């Protein structure tokens, strides 16, 4: 019995050492990850502070039933007013993006206003068309999500 207890105590101690060692390594990894995240947060805060203080930027959050599901914004690029929007994939095909963009365009009255959309993003093209945008051309642009240059369709809204 005593030897079993001794073995148990020894095993418990070894397990504790392994557990502590594992957690120490894990904590180092977590801390490294957090440092990277903190740096990213700082970069994003600097970026968004600059954007929010820019009078040419108009940025809204899309909230559904108290949950943030996306955003819509107007910014100026190369002298042209452009819009951008994003919505969580779980909320696609529910009319939320069209509804949000329509109401955003009632507040943001800059015209003409342009939008760019990936050639194969049929849902986004439909959203723009429902809100009165007309396709006026094509261009090539770098798509961050795809990490490559793609064909983009250029849309324009003159009146709403």
Image (cartoon, helix red, strand yellow):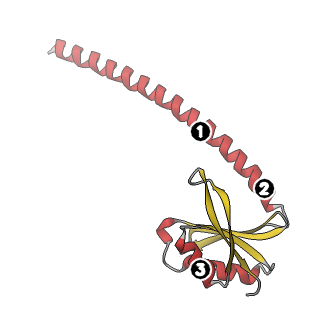
Residue 152 pos. (x, y %): 64, 65
Residue 59 in view of the camera: no
Compute the Cα span from label 1 to label 2.
22 Å
User: Mark 3 = which residue?
Assistant: 98
Picture quadrant of residue 48: bottom right
Q: Residues within 10 Å of mark 1 (few under 14, many from 20)?
A: few
Q: Is residue 53 left or right of residue 60?
A: right
Task: Quadrant for the N terminus, please.
Answer: top left
Q: Look at mark 1 in the image and give the residue it sits on.
A: 34
Residue 79 against residue 125 in the figure, above or below: above
Q: Residue at x 27, y 19 (%)?
A: 11
Asked if marks 1 and 3 touch (Cβ < 8 Å), the reply is no
In this rendered view, identify the residue nearer to me: 122 or 139: 139
Q: Is residue 131 visible?
A: yes
Rendered residue at 65%/78% (across/down): 101
Q: Which residue matches tag 2?
A: 49
Q: Is residue 24 left or right of residue 87?
A: left
């Amino acid at each position: 019995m005593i030897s079993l207890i001794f073995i148990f105590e020894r095993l418990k101690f070894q397990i504790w050492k392994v557990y502590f060692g594992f957690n120490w390594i894990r904590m180092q990894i977590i801390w490294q990850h957090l440092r990277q995240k903190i740096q990213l947060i700082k970069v994003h805060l600097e970026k968004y502070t600059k954007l929010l203080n820019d009078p040419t930027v108009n940025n809204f959050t899309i909230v559904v039933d108290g949950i943030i599901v996306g955003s819509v914004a107007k910014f100026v690029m190369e002298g042209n007013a452009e819009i951008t929007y994003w919505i969580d994939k779980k909320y696609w095909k529910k009319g939320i993006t069209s509804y949000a963009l329509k109401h955003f365009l009632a507040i943001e009255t800059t015209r003409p206003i342009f939008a760019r959309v990936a050639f194969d993003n049929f849902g986004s093209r439909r959203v723009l068309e429902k809100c009165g945008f007309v396709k006026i051309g094509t261009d090539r642009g770098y798509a961050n999500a795809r990490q490559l240059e793609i064909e983009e369709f250029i849309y324009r809204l003159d009146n709403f």
